[in-house]
Amino acid sequence: MPRFFADGVKDGVIKITGEDAGHIFRVLRGKPGDTLTVCDGRGTDYEARIKEAGASEIILEAVSQSPTQSEPKLSLTLYQALPKADKMELIIQKCVELGVYRVVPVNTERCVVKIEKNKEAKKLDRWRKISESAAKQSGRGLIPEIGSVMDFGAALKEAAQNGRAIIPYELERDRSLRDFLDGLSDEERAGHLAVFIGPEGGFTESEIVRATEQGVVPITLGKRILRTETAGMAVVANVMFYIS
């Protein structure tokens, strides 16, 4: 059943506008009597029946509701160093499908890409649309947030305030991702976890020192060196498999 997001239900009525309304009307050929799944973005799914259909607005009535079953208990924020080309789009798409709660682009010392302030809004708009599309496709109960670009130091401080955090580092040899996850309490498994992923050139030694000073735990992802667009997906997938 097609799935869409809407702000909520008022008196049993749901309204969908904008591009989604046009997609339902023109592409899906939605008409009165057809049913859709609509999520309020806060963990509730509605089975809804179309009452009125138009290119700019679809009006539905809620038939039934149920808690969204697709959201993990753990809220995972991915602090992703800005990669080259359009790799960020792939990272967002796949990590949203895998269950990430939030993605924050980060400027680090070895980032080749620098987004100019006058172009950041356009980039963020593009990335947020990719997040929404991936959330719909994968049956998510919310649209993961794509945060504004942050400096590494600011990202470290934010992560330190919100819970546990890890940073994969190629020179770390002793502590694996599994070691870290084994050490989490039941409360932490249902809390918040931050993951820092470096750019193509990796993190500098000074950045790792700064991270550990903020309580971020260096881990190894194994004997192979992963590309920046692979590392985040690998961590998110393993965390979701292990925690879920």
Image (spheres, rainbow, N blue to C red):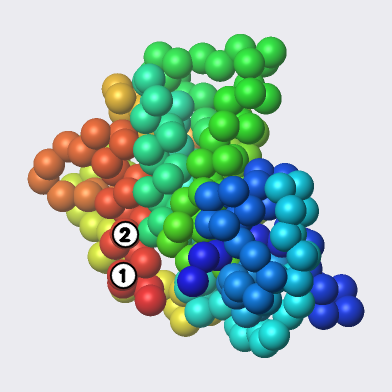
What residue sits 57% from the left and 77% below the top?
68
**Disc 1/disc 2 C-alpha distance (Å):** 6 Å
* Residue 227 percent across, percent down from the top left: 24, 34
Left or right? Give the position of 91 relative to 146: left
Q: Residues within 10 Å of mark 1 (few under 14, many from 20)?
A: few
Which quadrant, please, contains the C terminus? bottom left
Q: Which residue is mark 2?
A: 237
Q: Answer above or below: position of 217 versus 124.
A: below
Residue type at mark 2: give it: Ala
Q: Answer above or below: position of 142 versus 86.
A: below
Quadrant position of residue 192: bottom right
Point out the residue furthest to the right here: 11
What residue sits 29% from the left and 62% below the top?
238
Dot 2: element:
helix
Dot 1: element:
helix
Q: Which residue is mark 1?
A: 241
Q: Answer above or below: position of 171 versus 36.
A: above
The answer to whether one can see residue 207 in this image is no
Residue type at mark 1: give it: Phe
Q: Answer above or below: position of 218 versus 226.
A: below
Whether tag 1 and tag 2 are in contact, CB under 8 A, the answer is yes
Point out the residue furthest to the left here: 223
What residue sits 56% from the left and 16% below the top?
115
* Residue 27 percent across, percent down from the top left: 53, 50
